[in-house]
Image (cartoon, helix red, strand yellow):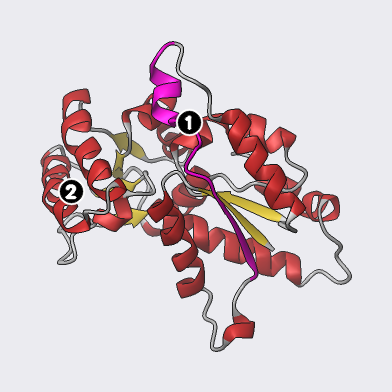
Amino acid sequence: MIGILGGMGPLATVDLMSKLIALSGAENDQDNLPVVVWSDPRVPDRRAALLEAGAPSPLPVMLQGIAALEAAGATLIIIACNTAHAWYETMAETAKVPILHIADSACDQLCSSLPEGSRVAVIATHATLVTGFYQERLERRGMKSLVLDDEDTHTHVQSVIACIKRGDIAASYRDMTAVLDKLLAKGADAALLACTELPLAAPPEGHVLPLFDATEALARAAIDYFRDISTCPALPTGLAVQSVMQERLLPR
C-alpha cells in the first residue's frame, strides 16, 4: 500500500493522489493501487521553520503522520510537499518503510527527457531553493540549474502558491505565466515545477517553455516501485519491503 504524507497543502495532496490514479492505467476499480492518505494541515509551516529563527519545526508532526501511515498498512511513503524534504534524511532513518525523495524522481525524469547540459529552471519556494537539494541533484546528473532572484521568488512564486492555497486557481495563471516568461528570458531550456502547488497553476493553454511536474514524476516513481515490489513472490510487508528496495531508494 502506498502512503501519502500530505496536508502541506491539502490541494497538493489531492493532486498527488489524482496523478496516482490517472497514471495507473487502471481499467476498473481493482486495477487501481491501494493508497492511504494522511492529510494533516496542522503541520507547522516548513518555510518558516527553515528561514525564521524560533519558528516551530514540522518534523515531529510529520513523524507522527509517517507512524500513522505505517500503522494503516503503508509499505512505501511519498510526501506531497517539496520543502518538507529538507527533513528527508531524518524521516527516512526513522521510518520502518522506504520513503521516496521527490527530487530524485523529478531529476531522473528530467535526465531521461533532456540532453546533458540543459539549463533547467527550478521554480520553488525560497526555502526549498535554500536547501539546494534540487540544484545539487541536477548538477550531479550533468544539468545546469537556474533560479529566479529572491525578489521575483517572493513576489511572483509566493503569489502563485498563495492563490492555490486559498483555492483561487484561475488567479494563479497570470503570475505563473509571468514567472515562466522571466525564466525563458534568463535562458532556461525547461522549467521544473518544484512546489506541489505549482502544477495546479500551470497555464491551461501551455507555455513555450517545456514544463516538468515534480508531483507527476513522484507519482510515476511510486507506481513503478509499487509494481516492482508487488511482483516479488511471497513478499511480506514493512521491513522485508525495505530490504528489497533499500539500494534504489537511497538518495543519489
Numbered label attached to residue 159: none
Residue beneath disc 2: 176
Eyeballing the image, is 205 above or below 151? below
Numbered circles on residues, count = 2
The foreground one among 121 and 47 is 47
In the image, is 138 to the left or to the right of 35?
Answer: left
Eyeballing the image, is 112 above or below 129? below
Residue 50 x %, y %: 44, 21
Numbered label attached to residue 44: 1
Q: Does the magenta segment cover residue 45?
A: yes
Answer few, some or many: residues within 10 Å of disc 2's Cα (few below 14, many 20 plus, some between 14 and 19): many
In the image, is 229 to the left or to the right of 160?
Answer: right
Q: As shown in the figure, which amino acid type bears the numbered disc 1?
A: Pro
Q: Which quadrant would the N terminus be assigned to in this image?
A: bottom right
Answer few, some or many: residues within 10 Å of disc 1's Cα (few below 14, many 20 plus, some between 14 and 19): some
Q: Residue furthest front?
A: 42
Instruction: Tell me the residue at 64%/46% (across/down).
Output: 99
Residue 112 visible to the viewer: no
Range of magenta residues: 34-53
Instruction: Tell me the residue at 56%/44% (across/down).
Output: 101
Q: Residue furthest top?
A: 53
Q: Secondary structure at mark 2?
A: helix
Residue 48 x %, y %: 40, 23
The foreground one among 29 and 56 is 56
